[in-house]
Image (spheres, rainbow, N blue to C red):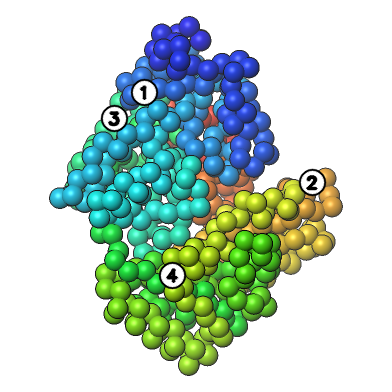
């Protein structure tokens, strides 16, 4: 296998044996390990295609690898299989000012693409905490969401064109820049969110937006989760479509994080309120937008919907507000082991979900830490469960959180994917008929099951 792969990508493009770095052998949470037979670093779509032709002919499993920041075990290679790291395919091929698009290779880091298009006066709306490591191929394969879904949608809404390599090495590409294309099946949407199980994304055309000229950011406190929907609707109505982020933090989360960050910065406001809301609006007229933003917050005060507010007056203050929501790696490391969940539901069902999840987790794991936060505007909540005093704590926490999710008709995965860690629970969000349809699609595109096997679809 090593000789065959070196003949395709060169000796410097193949890493094997003890030379394979630890980052390729475990996920970011250090929950699981794998032992790939080789790590491949191709330089082009044609090299990816040649690797897949070899893998197809030899029935060798292949797993694509992006930034290594996935949270569901989706990037773990099959034992002895091929791990394809697309980091060398990182070119930003074109920023088209007329069509407002960027054409980029799958290995490009999200933050690098954001900065490149910003320099040309554009915005790539996708934004998430792992922007400095997540790759374009990775965020496409998981249909990533992040903090601006409320205004601009998921990654699926930003992909106009796509190039991918199928299991047998066939290259398929539709790299058009048009918003409208109804010429038959839109196959690219099969690839988006498929976690590398149907094909390997190698290049994409992404839709850009004009770079905002003004940004308003505030942290709000409110008396109950029941007020959240009313606050959101008033902000959306009064800000005329400029509201881009609406992030929720329950008090347990806010108090824990802001206290842990005291050495870096003072908490932006005291803890103790039931819910904290981080809101951000983006517009094109700083004077008018600032006035409108302050005005709507005053109206929320007068209506009794919020009890406190801090408005960022500088970029440093804005970063400080976002740090409470996003700078979590070191903070969460203090909770070990911890179990993180990524679920979604209708905004109206959040209060019932939180109450049910709290009851179920406490019953299963008395005394466990439990925190809620997430992208409230689009119904996506993240749940953190701290260490339980039971050998099956992980399974018990999962049962509790996912059962509560199902009870409100929610999804067990809002944006992180299924990977391997949620395989046993996908039936809570997908019916047997839907799972059979997914298996039919998988067999049609990957009959030998070599593309990221063991991910997304559970065994029968």
Q: Which mark is residue 314?
A: 4
Please name which of the two marks, 4 or 1, marks the residue nearer to the observer.
Answer: 4
Disc with the residue nearer the chain's start (3 vs 2): 3
The residue beneath circle 3 is: 172
Real-space CA distance between mark 1 and mark 3, rounded to the nearest whole angstrom: 18 Å
Q: Check whether the beta carbons of the residues at disc 1 and disc 3 lie within 8 A of each other.
A: no
Q: Residue at x 45, y 17 (%)?
A: 13
Q: Is residue 373 above or below residue 192?
A: below
Taking 368 as reference, is 312 left or right?
Answer: left
> SS of the residue at dot 1?
loop
Please name which of the two marks, 3 or 4, marks the residue nearer to the observer.
Answer: 4
Q: Which mark is residue 300?
A: none
The residue beneath circle 1 is: 43
Mark 1 crowdedness (10 Å alpha carbons): few <14, some 14-19, many ≥20:
some
Kindly give the residue lying farthest to the top in the view shown. Answer: 3
Q: Quadrant of residue 205?
A: top left
Q: Residue at x 47, y 35 (%)?
A: 66
Q: Check whether the beta carbons of the residues at disc 4 and disc 1 lie within 8 A of each other.
A: no
Disc with the residue nearer the chain's start (1 vs 3): 1
Please name which of the two marks, 1 or 2, marks the residue nearer to the observer.
Answer: 1
Real-space CA distance between mark 3 and mark 4, rounded to the nearest whole angstrom: 46 Å
How many numbered marks, from 0 up? 4
Q: Residue at x 37, y 29 (%)?
A: 89
Q: Which mark is residue 392?
A: 2
Disc with the residue nearer the chain's start (3 vs 4): 3
Taking 69 as reference, is 367 left or right?
Answer: right
Disc with the residue nearer the chain's start (4 vs 1): 1
> SS of the residue at dot 2?
loop
Front-lying residue, 203 or 294: 294
Real-space CA distance between mark 4 and mark 1, rounded to the nearest whole angstrom: 42 Å
């Amino acid at each position: 296998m090593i000789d065959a792969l070196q003949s395709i990508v060169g000796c410097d493009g193949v890493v094997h044996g003890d030379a394979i770095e630890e980052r390729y052998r475990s996920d970011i949470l250090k929950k699981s390990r794998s032992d790939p037979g080789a790590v491949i670093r191709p330089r082009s779509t044609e090299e990816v295609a040649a690797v897949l032709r070899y893998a197809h002919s030899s029935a060798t499993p292949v797993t694509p690898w992006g930034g290594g920041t996935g949270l569901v075990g989706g990037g773990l290679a099959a034992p002895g299989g091929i791990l394809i790291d697309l980091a060398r395919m990182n070119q930003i091929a074109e920023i088209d000012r007329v069509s407002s698009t960027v054409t980029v290779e799958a290995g490009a880091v999200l933050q690098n693409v954001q900065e490149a298009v910003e320099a040309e006066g554009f915005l790539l709306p996708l934004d998430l905490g792992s922007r400095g490591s997540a790759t374009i191929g990775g965020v496409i394969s998981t249909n990533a969401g992040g903090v601006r879904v409320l205004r601009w949608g998921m990654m699926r809404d930003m992909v106009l064109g796509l190039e991918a390599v199928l299991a047998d090495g066939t290259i398929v590409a539709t790299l058009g820049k048009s918003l409208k294309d109804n010429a038959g099946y839109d196959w690219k949407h099969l690839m988006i969110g498929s976690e590398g199980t149907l094909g390997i994304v190698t290049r994409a055309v992404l839709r850009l937006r004009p770079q905002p000229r003004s940004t308003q950011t505030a942290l709000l406190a409110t008396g109950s989760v029941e007020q959240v929907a009313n606050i959101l609707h008033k902000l959306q109505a009064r800000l005329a479509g400029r509201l881009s982020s609406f992030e929720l933090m329950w008090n347990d989360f806010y108090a824990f994080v802001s206290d842990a960050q005291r050495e870096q910065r003072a908490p932006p406001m005291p803890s103790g309120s039931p819910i904290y809301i981080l809101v951000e609006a983006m517009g094109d007229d700083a004077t008018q937008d600032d006035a409108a933003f302050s005005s709507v917050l005053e109206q929320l005060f007068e209506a009794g919907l919020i009890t406190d507010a801090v408005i960022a007056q500088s970029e440093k203050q804005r970063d400080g507000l976002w740090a409470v929501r996003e700078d979590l790696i070191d903070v969460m490391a203090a909770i070990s082991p911890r179990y993180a969940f990524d679920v979604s539901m209708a905004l109206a069902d959040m209060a019932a979900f939180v109450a049910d999840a709290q009851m179920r987790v406490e019953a299963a794991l008395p005394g466990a830490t439990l925190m809620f936060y997430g992208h409230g505007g689009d119904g996506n909540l993240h749940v953190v469960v701290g260490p339980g005093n039971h050998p099956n704590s992980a399974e018990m926490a999962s049962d509790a959180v996912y059962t509560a999710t199902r009870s409100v008709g929610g999804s067990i995965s809002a944006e992180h994917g299924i990977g391997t860690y949620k395989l046993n629970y996908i039936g809570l969000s997908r019916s047997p008929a839907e799972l059979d349809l997914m298996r039919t699609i998988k067999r049609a595109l990957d009959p030998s099951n070599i593309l990221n096997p063991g991910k997304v679809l559970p065994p029968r």
